[in-house]
Amino acid sequence: DKRTPRTERKTDLRVAFVSQQQLRSFNHPYQLGWTGKEIGEDEDTSFRSAKESCNSSIHVRRGDIIIMATDGLFDNIDTDDIATIALEWEQQNGFIRGGDVAARQRRWQMGNSLTVLSSERIDDLAQRLSQRARENSLDTSIDSPFAILAKENDIMWSGGMPDDCTVIAMHVVGRSAKDLMDKDHQ
């Protein structure tokens, strides 16, 4: 949040990129899949080939956390809350201590990426996000991102949106987990 003075921020971490939703209409995302038959170009279907999807590229830096997930995550957890969960994961695992990003930079300069620790613990972040999405999807008292979007489309909806949820989490650390030099610094 750039509006909050730097001295009052918990961290300078932020969401750097969010891909656009690919929808036919509200709550009707395009699907990649196989229907069992060839689809004619004039047929009305939500199935598409991968070449028709939106492609994006973004530069990543050491320390970035990349979250790729289905709408089951993003319909139930706000992106700011996802960032907060990722920050808590980094702090609990010692990647950032007390919000001190500069200390992390110094540790990297000394050759300590905590690569092995990251590779052992990144699954925990994906599981935390999936679990929170599930909890929120069943909570009828919250205004989930899905509920907010539904109301913007004149659909009265409260609570989360029960849906399947796949989360892939990656932590860019700068060294291979097989790098023996880094094991001395774990």
Image (cartoon, rainbow, N blue to C red):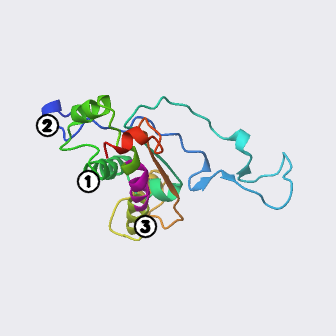
Prevalent SS, magenta region:
helix
Marks 2 & 1, CB-CB < 8 Å contact: no
Q: What residue appears at the point 20 percent right and 37 percent down from the top-left corner?
A: 100
| Mark 2 or mark 1, whichever is nearer to me | 1
The residue indicated by pointer 1 is 92
- Per the image, is 85 magenta? no
Q: In this view, does 59 lie to the left or right of 77?
A: right
Q: Is mark 3 on a helix, strand or loop?
A: helix
What residue type is disc 3 on? Arg
The residue indicated by pointer 2 is 8
Query: Sequence-wise, which precedes: disc 2 or disc 3?
Result: 2
What residue type is disc 2 on? Glu
State the image coordinates of residue 86 (x, y, percent, origin top left): 34, 49
What residue type is disc 1 on? Gln
Query: Sequence-wise, which precedes: disc 2 or disc 1?
Result: 2
Q: Nearer the viewer, residue 88 or 31?
A: 88
Q: What residue appears at the point 31 percent right and 47 percent down from the top-left corner?
A: 186
Disc 2 packing (10 Å; few <14; some 14–19; many ≥20): few
Q: In this view, does 2 lie above or below 172?
A: above
Query: Sequence-wise, which precedes: disc 1 or disc 3?
Result: 1
State the image coordinates of residue 70 (x, y, percent, origin top left): 54, 54
Span highlighted in magenta in the image: 118-127
Q: In this view, does 105 lie to the left or right of 43?
A: left
State the image coordinates of residue 172 (x, y, percent, origin top left): 43, 39
Marks 1 & 3, CB-CB < 8 Å contact: no
The residue indicated by pointer 3 is 134
* Image quadrant where residue 2 sits: top left
Q: Is mark 2 on a helix, strand or loop?
A: helix
* Image quadrant where residue 137 sits: bottom left
